[in-house]
Amino acid sequence: MCRADAASDAAPNSRVKLPSRRVFARRQSRLDRRVRTAARRPQTVMNIGQAARRAAGSCEGAGSQLTRRTLAGPAEASAEPTRYPTCVSKTLYLAESRARKSYQCAACKRLIPPKSAYFRHEPHPYARMQRGEKATQWCVECIEASEPEYDRWSAHYRVPAVRVLDRSRPDDSREMLQPVRVELIGIAPILVQKLAGDPSLIHEITPEQFEEFICDRLFAMGFEPRQVSATYASDGGIDILFWSRNPATFPILGAVQVKHHSNPATKEGQRTIRDFAGAIAGQPFNAGIVVTNTSFSPRAEWFARQRATLVRLRGFQDIKRWLANNFADTEEWREIPDTIELSPGLTVKVRQPR
């Protein structure tokens, strides 16, 4: 008989004071915690019904009705083999001691005789309750071969369990690590080979890949290219620097601004040319190139021809020649006039290569 029934029998005419809803909720949460804790520990599954009946008995006299809950057992262990037993912690915190009785080493399975030195690992109480970890004993040979680290604050040795277990395996059962040769292969040669078959694919590549492609073409021309920074980083309007690679030729230092568009109909405007001309004006550059995978607007071509004499414009048609390694075409000389008038009556004809 609960307390509420006893109070009603003793004083039939008196009013029984029922617990509040807050008390009911607290009792319900306490029951849930007991059920969850028991469900995680297989050895206490038989006590779930006893805990439920005890909590239900304390609330039955108050008129509360407990909700029936379905208790699911612990999940089955995965069939995939692990590198170390589940009852062993991933990191061992070892205390050096003397054996009171005979123990078996958890790594090499050798016997540890009484009164001999050994290492003992005591798992955290939470690890004992939740993961079922147990105290383990380890021989001195296995631990010293694993090169543990000493923690002077806790006066314990710390070492990963997998390191100890791998060293204790036979030589034929250890995982042999084969040397791996790592090679860095640039993406530009692959892009050139792919774009040579279909130049229209240049609108589908990323801006980063387009910059790699331009660097590869500059290298094929005989220059040494160098990317200034990442594609979307602040670079002062200059993406690539290049200079002469052959010391026998006349040295030249140039800058490149790369503009990539996914839409072939997009035209590069005058503002890009003006900003690039201002960026190279205060630097010791001998030439500047603005490269795009589309084309330029008439205003941009006029500005480069009249105001920015050091700037060269290269579009999609020029890129198709570069894909064929045709760097000596007459179109590459279109910014250079046929004749130059040095003074009245003195005109010099510039002979272009054929």
Image: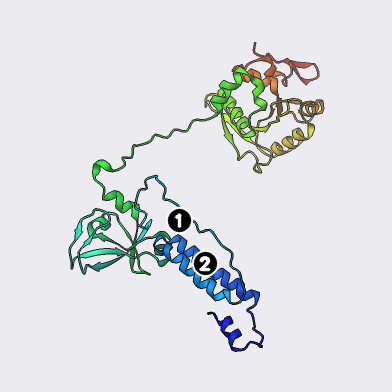
On screen, residue 10 above or below 276: below
**In screen coordinates, is 228 left or right of 80?**
right
Q: Nearer the viewer, residue 326 or 306?
A: 326
Q: Nearer the viewer, residue 113 or 309?
A: 113
Q: Examine the image and state in which quarter residue 15 appears.
A: bottom right
Identify which amino acid the numbered label 2 is placed on. Arg
Which residue, given by chain and number where applicable, does mark 1 sit on?
74
Q: Examine the image and state in which quarter residue 245 appears.
A: top right
Q: Which of the two labelled residues, at mark 2 and mark 1, occupies the earlier sequence position? A: 2
User: Quick check: can you spot residue 202?
Assistant: yes
User: What is the x, y in percent for residue 89?
Assistant: 37, 58
**Label 2 neighbourhood size at 10 Å, few (<14), some (14-19), many (20+)?**
few
The residue most toward the top is 354
Q: Could you tell me which secondary element the residue under label 2 belongs to?
A: helix
Q: Residue at x 53, y 74 (%)?
A: 57
Identify which amino acid the numbered label 1 is placed on. Pro
Q: Nearer the viewer, residue 47 or 94?
A: 47
Q: What colour scheme does the image use?
A: rainbow
Mark 2 and mark 1: span between their CA atoms? 15 Å
Which residue, given by chain and number where applicable, does mark 2 sit on?
33
**Label 1 neighbourhood size at 10 Å, few (<14), some (14-19), many (20+)?**
few
Q: Could you tell me which secondary element the residue under label 1 belongs to?
A: loop
Q: Examine the image and state in which quarter residue 114 appears.
A: bottom left
Q: Residue at x 64, y 80 (%)?
A: 18
Instruction: Tell me whether circle 2 and circle 1 mark residues in contact (CB < 8 Å).
Output: no
Quadrant where the image shows the C terminus: top right
User: What is the x, y in percent for residue 311?
Assistant: 71, 29
